[in-house]
Image (spheres, grey):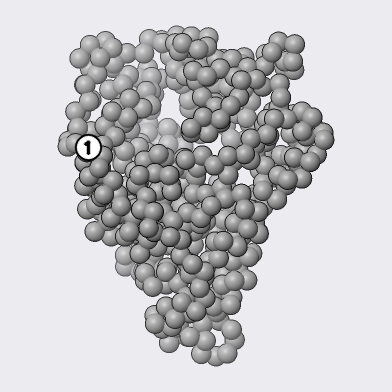
Amino acid sequence: TFSDGKPLTAEDVVFSFDFAMTEAIQAPAERSLYERISSVKATGSHEVVFTYKDPYFEALELAGGMWIMPKHFYEPYLDIPQKFNESKGLLLGSGPYRLEDPKGWTPDKGNVELVRNERYWGDVQPSYDRILWKIIQNDSARLTTYRNGEIDSYAAKPVEYAKLKADEQIMGKSQNFEFMSPIASYSWIGWSQGPDDKPSRFADKRVRQAMTYMTDVARIIRDVHLDYGAPAVSPFSDTSKQHDPDLKPYAFDLEKARALLKDVGYEDRNGDGVIETAAGEPFEFRMTYFQGNEDTNRMVLLLKDIYAQAGVKLVPFPQEWPVMVEALNKKDFEAITLAWTSGVETDINQMFHSSQTIANGNNFINYKSPELDKLIDEARATVDEEKRMALWGEAEKILYEDQPYTFLFRRKTLAFIDKRIKNLGLTKLGLNRTFLPTETFVPGDQQLYSQ
């Protein structure tokens, strides 16, 4: 059943697909995932047949991993899709935990509270009566909250990790974990190529390559992340079969960067230290980034100094998260730095296929490559793993050459978790903190909170 006691049936699966594919519903990312499915039909109360338009390498994973939405809860929003699109806290499902009020959460509450789903169907029942995520955007406030015992886990910044390991109070209450997951997210700088009718300076591949050459990733890893990271060459993890080990990170080279920019037509024509076009337009741009991340702020300031050596003026443009998301959706930025989660095998259609330059799509840099589109389409349609990996390899080479992103690094997870939480351990994919059916728990005599 769903957490409200209503039965989960095949009709809910069919509805979930139809709901996501409804154009009026703001779900372009989901539609890009489900676009290969031609139909979803119920052939019994608990049996569903997925029919694909053509072969797809993740067909089983896509069907099995579809988020099942209760028809009785969400169907009314098909008549008023705008109300659904503007709602922030509609959540009813069948997982181990649930919102106490599936319509009652709003971002202004400052936290997300889930309670145990007593009707959960899994073999291992949820361990906790209540899980509370506190939204604390300031790094120092987050550490203070952990130190005071108000939260039970803390993801440390590299600059503080060694100090915290030597902190008797922290280590007296904590177990710490340091690891690089094969699905670790990768950080990047995205260069907006602008609308088709008004391309930006970053629409020229040579400019993007120059920006990558002048981005000293090794120094960022060393000085900002204290070597708790590794360079990212592409969206594909170094441990993935998708990755070509012969591709190495772009070496930091200001001379190559200057030469590429001169070839485009940028020179310092007035001696002010900033390069300009022949028309006198200076190479100056804003770098948009999340203002609550101290490491990102340090990285942007470092890059500002480095880019200046090549005559490029970076203007830091820190933003609050909601403002930043709006800028992404509207494609209202020149350059932006963020991170994507990765996988053992990563489908890059969502980020780099030209079909995803649509409104609210995830190719918000407006990057288009017919050759890459063709390889992505072929790879996604190839079930044979060896042949598919060869296609991903060719796709990676195009991204390496085109540099739609400057790929930065993958960072280790540096976590402190209260010792009261038992049965934690590392798996091949990382820490089992939120994985079921592995059970983590707090012994009764160490429990601090009541329901």
Q: Mark 1 Cα within 10 Å, few/some/many (few <14, many 20+)?
A: some
Residue type, label 1 = Val
- Residue toward you, 251 or 399: 251
Residue 10 in percent (x, y) is at: 29, 16
Q: How many marks?
A: 1
Farthest residue toward the front? 246
In this rendering, position of residue 448 left or right of residue 328: right
Visible in this render: residue 313?
Answer: no
Above or below, comparing residue 366 to residue 5 in the picture? below
Residue positioned most to the bottom = 270
The C terminus lies in which quarter of the figure?
top right
What residue is rendered at 40% in x and 62% in y? 403
Identify the residue at horizontal 48%, vertical 25% (top origin).
91
* Location of the N terminus (image quadrant): top left
The one nearer the camera, 448 or 22, is: 448
- Compare residues 161 and 330 and report the one nearer the observer: 161
Q: Which quadrant of the view contains residue 176?
A: top right
Mark 1 element type? loop
Relative to 389, 435 lies left or right:
right
Examine the rendering and report whether any part of residue 427 can be seen.
Answer: yes
Residue that carries the numbered disc 1 in the rendered image: 383
Write the residue at 71% across / 24% down.
Answer: 419
Percent position of residue 301, x then y: 64, 64
Q: Is residue 164 above or below residue 188?
A: above
Q: Residue at x 75, y 40 (%)?
A: 165
Q: Which residue is most to the right?
A: 168
- State the residue in front, 325 or 224: 224
Residue 381 screen position, x and y as percent: 21, 41
Question: Could you say where residue 46 lies in the image, as x and y percent from the top left?
Answer: 28, 12
